[in-house]
Amino acid sequence: MLKWIRPLLKNAFAWLLSIVVLIPFAVMLVNSLKTREESYSMTLKLPAVLQFQNYLTVIEQGNVIPSFFNSFMYASLSVVLVVLTCSMAAFVISRNDTRLNRFAYFFIIMGIVLPVNYVALMKVMQVTMLNNTRLGISLLYTAMNIPISLFITCSFIGSIPKDLDEAAIIDGCGPWSLFFRIIFPLLKPVAVTVGVLCFMASWNDFMMPLYYLNNSAKWPMSLTVYSFFGASMQAQRQWNLVCADIVLTSIPVIVVYLLGQKYIVSGITAGAVKG
């Protein structure tokens, strides 16, 4: 009897967790299609008439399209830098187990738990003349995502046999060709995993552009939600438009996650089997 009760309880628990996670997004989606008066209550009650023009209003008034390209540039550049730097660093650290490399590895991954000092970071950004620049915010996102990405990549590279390196060297590969022609193609699952996580973290970030971008023309989509929310609070409390803006901001992240989901699962499985 326990054979069918246990899977049933597991499935029920999984469905319950899924519903709890999806409720906030459902609230945003439903209220984004309501009139201003209907959205005051912020409930899951369906609107009398679907107000799709809320999205057109947000796109026209919220400066969404330029902000979309800003977010895409910041997230894409940080993904490329994180994947390349972490892959190369993880390869060197994993293949050369010296005290210096171990110290560098643990020093970098300490960033997973250490908080960001925004005051000191502002001074560094000013000294390096990266404050209020697109390159500066992209480098900030890169630095924020390197610790966890290096941790994941090192664990994966450690499962790749060193015999591949020796065979490639015997065949005439140098250090660069060994990495880019032999090792890097094998890192596709973990590279996609790191890339998706980095993209989501960069796209959803709110604090960094708020502190280090003073020009609204350089703001990402996350800050358009903030500016629209502030305007609505002072004037009309248009929660329907706020919800529409949040939904538009969330769509690219959901798409990227769905595209990379199968690679994330395959990367975790490949690492487990090789270990």
Image: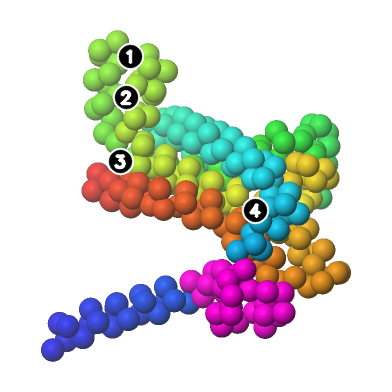
Residue 80 in the magenta stretch? The answer is no
Residue type at mark 3 is: Ser
Work out whether mark 3 precedes mark 2 in sequence or the reverse, and give the earlier one: 3
Looking at the rendered image, the disc whose residue lies closer to the viewer, 4 or 2, is 4
Tell me what residue is drawn at x 73 percent, y 49 percent.
63
Cα separation between marks 1 and 2: 9 Å
Instruction: Check disc 1: other Cα within 10 Å, few if <14, some if 14-19, many if 20+.
Output: some
From the image, tell me which residue sits under label 1: 173
User: In x, y percent, where is residue 265?
Assistant: 33, 52
Looking at the rendered image, the disc whose residue lies closer to the viewer, 1 or 2, is 2
Cα separation between marks 4 and 2: 35 Å
Work out whether mark 4 precedes mark 3 in sequence or the reverse, and give the earlier one: 3
From the image, tell me which residue sits under label 3: 159
Residue type at mark 4 is: Asp
User: In the rendered image of this protein, does residue 170 appear above or below residue 39?
Assistant: above
249 sits to left or right of 229: left
Q: Are marks 1 and 2 in contact (CB under 8 Å)?
A: yes
Cα separation between marks 3 and 1: 21 Å
Q: Is residue 82 visible?
A: no
User: In x, y percent, where is residue 38?
Assistant: 67, 80
Tell me what residue is drawn at x 41 percent, y 53 percent.
258
Looking at the rendered image, the disc whose residue lies closer to the viewer, 3 or 2, is 2
From the image, tell me which residue sits under label 4: 205
Work out whether mark 4 precedes mark 2 in sequence or the reverse, and give the earlier one: 2
Mark drawn on residue 182: 2
Q: Residues in magenta?
A: 22-51
Looking at the rendered image, the disc whose residue lies closer to the viewer, 4 or 3, is 4
Q: Which residue appears farthest toward the front when viewing the image?
A: 49
Cα separation between marks 3 and 2: 14 Å
